[in-house]
Image (cartoon, helix red, strand yellow):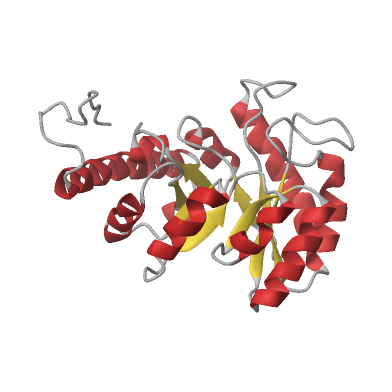
Amino acid sequence: MTEHDATGRNAAGRNADDPEVRRAELAANLALVEERIASACAASGRAREEVTLIVVTKTYPASDVRLLHELGVRNVAENRDQDAAPKAAECADLDLKWHFVGQLQTNKVRSVVGYADVVQSIDRMKLVTALSAAAVRAGRELGCLIQVALDADAGARGERGGVAPDGIGELAAAIDGASGLRLDGLMTVAPLAGEYAGRQRDAFERLMEFSSGLRVGHPAANMVSAGMSSDLEEAVAAGATHVRVGTAVLGVRPRLG
């Protein structure tokens, strides 16, 4: 991954804002991430096609999204509506699948439904109701993942969002019965505290167990989103179908203003 100094120039002294320089950086980073995913799949006896890369473009400009599209990326993710909505509008001419992965407040639902194809962070009934109403109003079908908090006690939510495992069934039934929504599967973020802190592989394997249970009653809900830049190998080994990678592809850049 290429480092930049305070002037925005890379190690070779070239301006990092030059589109061609940025494109080369992204291409190199994508190649490294692709190699990691392919190696993890091979080590686990999985086909490379079983894992979809979602590039998390939060804090990065629409120009980066366009470059990523040129480089073959088709799945991108955002976690803040105020950043995502204008970026998605600017890239509306591209064939991209937008994933919303952040904690979602009900007052942002109508905006998010306008551009997101999948919301990966559903963790409460009120959100299901609001998303359904907005999806019906917009005439869209929205893919939904239940975010599972592996650090949450029964009936509680995790520090980084998500429903406790004992709440999966109720939310799944609600999504499955809601107009405009499609139950696609489960998502988690590796816990920073609790039983699974520092044990990403165990955490992701536990999520796979919940996925197997979910698919008994909802066989089409086979998407499992887990793993980020630092732990994508553990997620692939556990059986994740989608990994969410930001820093390893885009590097460390200033936040959007």
Total marks drawn? Answer: 0
- Residue 183 versus residue 57 in the image, above or below: below
Q: Is residue 128 visible?
A: yes
Question: Residue at 70% across / 21% down in the picture?
Answer: 193
Question: Residue at 43% across / 56% down in the picture?
Answer: 87
Give how far across and how far down residue 137 sits, in percent.
70, 76
Q: Nearer the viewer, residue 190 or 81?
A: 81
Give how far across and how far down residue 215 sits, in percent.
75, 58
Which quadrant of the figure contains the C terminus?
top left
> Image check: 95 left or right of 138?
left
Question: Residue at 21% across / 31% down in the picture?
Answer: 8
Residue 190, image quadrant: top right
Q: Nearer the viewer, residue 185 or 180?
A: 180
Q: Which residue of the protein is positioned furthest toward the left in this rendering? A: 13
> Image check: 61 left or right of 230?
left
Give how far across and how far down residue 29 sits, in percent.
29, 40
Residue 30, image quadrant: top left
> Image check: 101 left or right of 12?
right
- Residue 246 versus residue 53 in the image, above or below: above
Give how far across and how far down residue 18 sits, in percent.
16, 45
Q: Is residue 241 visible?
A: no
- Residue 192 versus residue 24 in the image, above or below: above
Question: Residue at 17% across / 30% down in the picture?
Answer: 9
Q: Nearer the viewer, residue 185 or 128?
A: 128
Which quadrant of the figure contains the N terminus?
top left
> Image check: 244 left or right of 170?
left
